[in-house]
Structures are given as structure tokens and as C-alpha cells.
Amino acid sequence: MAYNTGSPMPPPPPYINLADQGGNNTMDLHPPSSRNLPRYHSGRKKGNECCKCVCWFCCFIFIIILAIAGFFVYLYVIYKPQTPSYSLSSFSVGAFDFRPAELTLNTKIFVSVRAENPNEMIGINYGEGSSIVIAYQNATLSSGELPIFYQGHKNVTVMQIVLEGSHPYGSGLQKAIEESSKSGSVPLDVYVKVPFSLKLDELDLHEVTVNIHCALVVDSISPKKKPNIVSAKYDVDAEF
């Protein structure tokens, strides 16, 4: 029978390994050998940084697009832009001579082009590179160019343009024009190329090229008779 003397029991050893050697149990108080476990680094942090960069870039592009759209809305509301209009107001022939010996056609045609700027706060700068061509059944008769000038607000300008040409012609061109003149209906194609830029106060915007095709019908194309405009149909296209 054992008696408790009141003294505390000693704590057990921190590590106990039991080994069977020849049937004898021995106590080994040494801790087991520690192993260096491999450490794995997660790529989550790097991936999060890439996502943040993409998000910031998308937000930046969106803000730029929004600012540009707001700028154009502001211009539209403040300046209230309207499309300028162009028309052919008069047509006359100074020379229209067939030269059979040279198979050339010499022409001199006078046209008046009416340009109207209906805008109250926008001016128009007409630049270089303009052209106007008159053709009959795809054969060029005369050509010229528009003047370089500035058109102010709420302005109508009539441009007097001289077109000249000396072009070879086929055997059937003279006969076709003579027959059209006898019938009182000469179909002509007038091609006008107008490069211009808008001026907002002191700000010059990007240049735009307007291409105009006028399907013109006159009753005569002879210098001996004043031609009358029978009809004119316009088709307008813009190059930005």
C-alpha cells in the first residue's frame, strides 16, 4: 500500500521514444530529429496586382472617352452646328470647239457656285486642294478649282469659277452632244471637291473634305446660245 506524502509528482519528459533492443525497453529523452519542410509561395498577390493594373487602365480609358464625348456635347449645345449648302446658280459657255484635225475638244465654261453658311457662331475656312470637273458621258470637258477664302457666320458667297479644258475625244462624242443639244436636254456630271475646316472662335477644327456630285441637265452647250438649267440633283459625301 502506497502513501501520499504530499509532494507533487515530477512532470513527464518532453519526448519519450521507446525502442525494443533485445527485449529491453530503453527510454530516450532526446527529441526526434526535425525536418526542413518545403515552403510554397502563393502567386495570388502577383495576380491581384495585375488585376488592379487592368482595372485602373480600363477606368482611365473610360474617363478619356467620357471627357471627349462631353466636349462634343458641349460644342453641339453651345454652337448648334448646321450643315453648309452648295448649289450651282448659273452656267454659261465661252468656248466649245471641236477640232477634227487634232481630235481635241477645247472648252471654256463659266459657272457660279453658291455657298451658304447658316451657322451663327461657326466660320468656314476653304483650303487648298479643291477641284470642279464637268463631264459628259464620262468624258471630261472642263475643270478648275475653287478659291481659297474664309466664309463668316450667316454668310452667302457666290463664287465665279472659270473652267477650261483641252481633251481628246472619240468619234461618237461630237455626234452625241449635237443630238442632245437638238433635243434640248444635255446631261452633264459636275464633280466638286471641297476641303474645308470649321472655325470655332479662335479654334480651327480638323479639315473635312466634301465631295459633291451634281447631275446637271442644260438645254444647250453652245457658246452661241445662253444655256438654261433644266434640272440639278445633288449627292453629297464627306471624308473625315
Image (cartoon, helix red, strand yellow):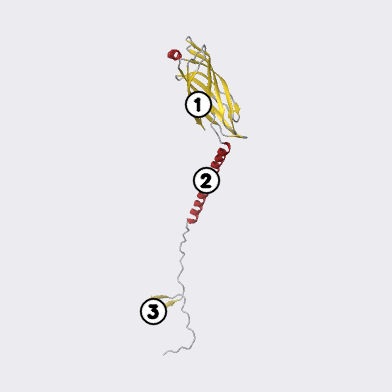
Name which residue type carries label 3: Asn
Give the x, y percent position of residue 55.
Answer: 51, 50
Q: Residues within 10 Å of mark 1 (few under 14, many from 20)?
A: some
Give the x, y percent position of residue 78.
Answer: 58, 38
Q: Residues within 10 Å of mark 2 (few under 14, many from 20)?
A: few
Instruction: Give the SS element for disc 2.
Output: helix
Name which residue type carries label 2: Phe
Q: Earlier in the sequence, mark 2 or mark 3?
A: 3
Residue indicated by mark 1: 212
Total numbered labels: 3
Give the x, y percent position of residue 27.
Answer: 43, 77
Q: Which is more toward the observer, 152 or 7?
A: 152
On screen, residue 63 above or below 127: below
Q: Earlier in the sequence, mark 1 or mark 2?
A: 2
Report the disc number at residue 12.
Answer: none
In this orientation, does residue 160 appear? yes
Q: CA distance from mark 1 to mark 2?
A: 37 Å
On screen, residue 193 above or below 65: above
In this orientation, does residue 215 appear? no
Name which residue type carries label 1: Ile
Task: Name the image quarter holding residue 148.
Answer: top right
Report the disc number at residue 62.
Answer: 2
Report the disc number at residue 24.
Answer: 3
Q: What residue do we see at 50% from left, 56% from top?
A: 45
Q: Earlier in the sequence, mark 1 or mark 3?
A: 3
